[in-house]
């Protein structure tokens, strides 16, 4: 009978953890633009506080939204909530209407909102927060390691863009932006905090992203937008947002995962970050995946890559969320 009772209670707990409630909040407003977060909450026993997984979406800083299918995915939300974690996926203002400093300010404000306001209305532990992101969101997650106060307990960076904005393979400040690029930027210069892009070549922001990548102007558009600004000035500004230039001994434990066939973000960026973390004796794991490209994790949880590299990222962070 005791074994049957144990099985019964275990099944009840499993069902409780599988129940997820999702609700959207406005965490800040800038010039009448509401910037939102969607909160996915597990059902927990009375009195139990949930750790928080703060997710920052991908999209090259000019596209994406908190509720894209990969930001995080449904399978990731279900897995995290089954562990008793609350998932908070945030929007942020998108370039080129704003600079990277404005986007980072949104991340800081979202983090403060979770700690100071969300914690007053939901059973979360404001001192147990992992910050995670994919691609551009992964780069923002790395920036959070030295820009957020108090620092996150852990960071998970999926194929992050970037850890080093002054890598010449990523950002070349010595060349002038083309007239075509300036025109594309002007056409996309609208204040938005979410953009649901398509995979078609007719999508204007996707076209802009492709042009920025081809001309290696991602760093320039994030800190300058002035075609006449000197390369020296741009390099100085980019150092503020290059994680490898801002790591210290208090940087949070960090999980870096990157496909070695990534044609969007060079996996050498994650190697550079790992080397710097090692230099400062920060706990980290560098998870390089042979044969996988960008957005490798946007797959079924039954697939090997998802099991081996997404679950292991969550397991890494869990060590620091107690």
Image: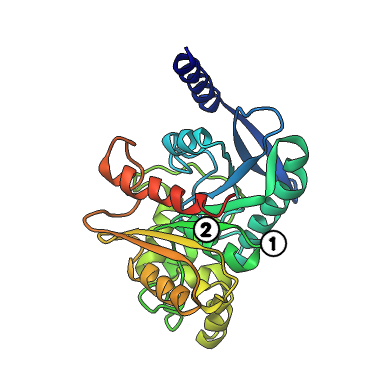
**Front in this rendered view, residue 77 or 168:** 77
Q: Position of residue 221 (x, y in %)?
A: 52, 68
Q: Which residue is mark 2?
A: 155
Sequence order check: which comes first, mark 2 or mark 1? Answer: 1
Can you say whether 161 is above or below 315 in the image? below
Classify residue 121 as left or right of residue 140.
right
Can you say whether 202 is above or below 24 in the image? below
Whether residue 101 is visible here, answered yes or no, is yes
Q: Which mark is residue 150?
A: 1
| Residue plotted at (51% across, 37% down) | 83
Q: How many marks?
A: 2
| Callout 2 secondary element | strand
Q: CA distance from mark 2 to mark 1?
A: 13 Å
Figure quadrant of residue 175: bottom left
Can you say whether 218 is above or below 57 in the image? below
Q: Position of residue 207 (x, y in %)?
A: 39, 55
Query: Furthest-top residue in view?
Result: 1
Can you say whether 24 is above or below 189 in the image? above
Q: Position of residue 106 (x, y in %)?
A: 66, 56
| Callout 1 secondary element | loop
| Residue plotted at (49% across, 16% down) | 2
Question: How many C-alpha atoms fall within 10 Å of the one at disc 2: few (<14), some, or many (≥20)?
Answer: many
């Amino acid at each position: 009978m005791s074994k049957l009772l144990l099985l019964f209670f275990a099944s009840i707990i499993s069902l409780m953890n599988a129940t997820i409630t999702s609700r959207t909040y406005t965490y800040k407003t800038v010039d009448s633009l509401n910037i939102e977060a969607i909160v996915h909450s597990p059902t927990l026993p009375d009195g139990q506080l949930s750790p928080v997984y703060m997710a920052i979406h991908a999209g090259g800083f000019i596209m994406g939204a908190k509720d894209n299918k990969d930001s995080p995915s449904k399978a990731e939300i279900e897995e995290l909530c089954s562990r008793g974690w609350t998932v908070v996926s945030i929007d942020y203002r998108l370039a080129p209407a704003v600079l990277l400093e404005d986007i980072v300010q949104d991340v800081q404000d979202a983090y403060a909102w979770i700690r100071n306001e969300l914690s007053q209305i939901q059973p979360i532990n404001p001192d147990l927060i992992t910050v995670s992101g994919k691609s551009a969101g992964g780069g923002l997650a790395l920036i959070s390691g030295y820009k957020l106060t108090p620092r996150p307990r852990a960071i998970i960076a999926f194929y992050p863009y970037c850890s080093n904005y002054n890598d010449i393979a990523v950002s070349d400040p010595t060349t002038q932006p083309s007239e075509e690029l300036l025109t594309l930027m002007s056409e996309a210069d609208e204040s938005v905090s979410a953009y649901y892009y398509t995979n078609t070549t007719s999508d204007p922001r996707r076209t802009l992203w492709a042009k920025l990548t081809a001309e290696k102007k991602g760093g320039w558009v994030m800190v300058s937008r002035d075609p006449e600004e000197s390369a020296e000035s741009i390099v100085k500004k980019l150092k503020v947002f290059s994680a490898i230039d801002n790591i210290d001994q208090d940087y949070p434990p960090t999980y870096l995962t990157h496909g070695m066939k990534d044609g969007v973000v060079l996996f050498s960026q994650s190697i550079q970050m790992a080397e710097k973390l090692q230099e400062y004796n920060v706990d980290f794991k560098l998870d390089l995946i042979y044969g996988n490209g960008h957005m490798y994790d946007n797959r079924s949880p039954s697939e090997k890559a998802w099991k081996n590299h997404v679950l292991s990222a969550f397991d890494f962070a869990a060590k620091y969320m107690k």
